[in-house]
Amino acid sequence: QVQLVDSGGGSVQAGGSLRLSCVASEWTYSTYCMGWFRQAPGKEREGVAVHYTGGGSTYYADSVKGRFTISQDNAKSTLYLQMNSLKPEDTAMYYCAAEPRLVPGTCPPRIYEYNYWGQGTQVTVSS
């Protein structure tokens, strides 16, 4: 089964940038829905950015549109989340997630749709 390892979190000031990485291994299928979720203290986990690894549209939460960009490097089996113009409200534990998807289409930002998860990486943004 898929193994996901998240990294790249840290502490930054508001307006700063971070790039999260998710290295995937033990791929079984050729295409997946794959993306990033986050969970702030006392809040539910929410979808931040998800996309279909075979190409197509990407979902971004309204709160991150224009600031976050998801990308992938197939040669490195790595998914990235470039986060710019960070805000204190972006502070959360960020998780990479994946789920096999054989049919092209829009990937859902719902946590229960994903069975494979990274261990999480903490992002802290100070004002």
Image (spheres, rainbow, N blue to C red):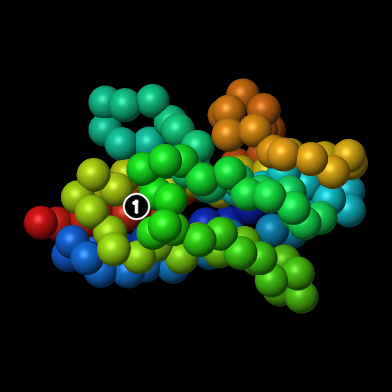
Residue 105 locus on image (x, y percent): 79, 40
Q: In the rendered image, which quarter is residue 43 located in?
A: top left
Q: In this view, does 90 lie to the left or right of 30?
A: left
Nearer the observer, 50 or 115: 50
Q: What element carries label 1?
A: strand
Nearer the observer, 66 or 112: 66
Q: Is residue 55 left or right of residue 42?
A: right
User: How many numbered marks appear?
Assistant: 1
Residue pictured at 43% horizontal, 31% vertical: 45
Residue 25 locus on image (x, y percent): 74, 59
For the N terminus, give its image quadrant.
top right
Residue under label 1: 122
Q: Residue furthest bottom?
A: 75
Q: In this view, does 110 lie to the left or right of 46?
A: right
Residue type, numbered disc 1: Gln
Residue 81 locus on image (x, y percent): 50, 61
Residue pictured at 72% horizontal, 66% vertical: 77
Compared to residue 10, the image places residue 61 above or below, namely above
Residue pictured at 29% horizontal, 63% vertical: 85
For the C terminus, give its image quadrant.
bottom left
Q: In the rendered image, which quarter is residue 54 located in?
A: bottom right
Residue 2 visible in the displayed image: no
Residue 103 visible in the displayed image: yes
Residue 16 locus on image (x, y percent): 25, 69
Mark 1 neighbour class, 10 Å CA radius: few under 14, some 14 to 19, many 20 or more: some
Q: Is residue 91 left or right of residue 9?
A: left
Residue pictured at 61% horizontal, 24% vertical: 112
